[in-house]
Image (tube, rainbow, N blue to C red):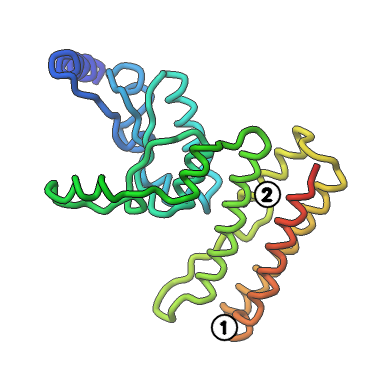
């Protein structure tokens, strides 16, 4: 295996030097795309696999993997591109993490080569992407932007699940308030003393209340009381807005 990598490295280096092509390490983090290849192959770019990107707003573990890959790319002086960017929120969160290159249906679907010039001419990024690039937040502001995106996704996942058609299996958000994105954020905020205990305590209480309401609505839905569950969505939205209000006041 080591000899294979060495031979492949020679071939790729020859292509890069003779033809001027760029080499990308595809599907990084899965299968055979490993740290060994990052170290020994002359890749200019790392491609974050879409399986991590797709659920990064829902799954803190996928978020952590992407954060780690971006850090590795920076340490090895490689560019990094994210596959599977399907929404404005995906792209904004990646920008906020320091990943400025992406591909996916949120940008464009596959097209014939003849259509590419017109697409390039008329393409406009999402407005929030443009704002972020022109005025990138830093420090606490960047940290809180990621949190807001993740809280919003949690509520949207609840809404989608409660409104799911009968023949579609609901995809519920993480119900344990210590295991979701926000739960991990509050643990980090406590550990590193980001905010005053009083304000952070109020935010944690609001977060737990939102999860409590969400769990009640999920149980109603699973008991066949979908109408009652849907009637509780305004209360969930109010709890969501209260979290954001407290977050804006935290010092």
- Give me the residue at 79% from left, 57% from top: 205
The x and y percentages for residue 80 are: 38, 31
- Give me the residue at 42% from left, 45% from top: 52
Quarter of the picture holding the N terminus: top left
147 on left or right of 114: right
Q: Are marks 1 and 2 in contact (CB under 8 Å)?
A: no
Quarter of the picture holding the C terminus: top right
The residue tagged 1 is: 226
The x and y percentages for residue 109 are: 26, 53
Instruction: Looking at the picture, tell me which residue is in the foreground, 29 or 123.
Output: 123
The residue tagged 2 is: 183
Quadrant in the picture for residue 72: top left
Decide: is 142 above or below 171. above
The x and y percentages for residue 189 are: 73, 39
Instruction: Looking at the picture, tell me which residue is in the foreground, 122 or 220.
Output: 122
The local crowd at label 2, few if under 14, some if 14 to 19, many if 20 or more residues have their Cα within 10 Å, is some
Distance from Cα at disc 1 to Cα at disc 2:
27 Å
From this viewpoint, is residue 207 visible? no
Mark positioned earlier in the residue sequence (1 or 2): 2
Q: Secondary structure at mark 2?
A: helix
Decide: is 211 above or below 73. below
Number of labels in the image equals 2
Instruction: Looking at the picture, tell me which residue is in the foreground, 79 or 108.
Output: 108
79 on left or right of 15: right
The x and y percentages for residue 129 are: 47, 45
128 on left or right of 38: right
């Amino acid at each position: 295996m080591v000899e294979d990598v060495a031979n492949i490295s020679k071939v790729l280096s020859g292509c890069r030097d003779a033809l001027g092509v760029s080499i990308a390490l595809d599907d990084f983090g899965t299968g055979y795309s490993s740290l060994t290849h990052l170290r020994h192959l002359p890749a200019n770019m790392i491609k974050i696999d879409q399986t991590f990107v797709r659920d990064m707003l829902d799954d803190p573990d996928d978020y952590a993997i992407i954060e780690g890959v971006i850090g590795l790319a920076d340490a090895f002086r490689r560019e990094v591109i994210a596959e599977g960017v399907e929404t404005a929120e995906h792209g904004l969160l990646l920008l906020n993490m320091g990943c400025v290159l992406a591909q996916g249906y949120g940008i464009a679907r596959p097209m014939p080569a003849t259509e590419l010039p017109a697409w390039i001419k008329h393409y406009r990024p999402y407005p929030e992407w443009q704002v972020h690039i022109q005025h990138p937040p830093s420090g606490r502001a960047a940290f809180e932007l990621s949190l807001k995106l993740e809280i919003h996704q949690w509520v949207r996942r609840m809404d989608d699940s409660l409104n799911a058609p009968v023949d579609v299996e609901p995809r519920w958000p993480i119900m344990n308030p210590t295991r979701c994105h926000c739960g991990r954020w509050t643990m980090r905020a406590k550990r590193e003393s980001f905010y005053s205990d009083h304000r952070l305590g109020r935010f944690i209480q609001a977060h737990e209340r939102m999860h409590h309401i969400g769990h009640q609505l999920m149980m109603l839905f699973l008991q066949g009381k979908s109408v009652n569950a849907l009637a509780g969505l305004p209360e969930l939205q109010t709890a969501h807005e209260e979290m954001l209000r407290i977050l804006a006041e935290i010092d």
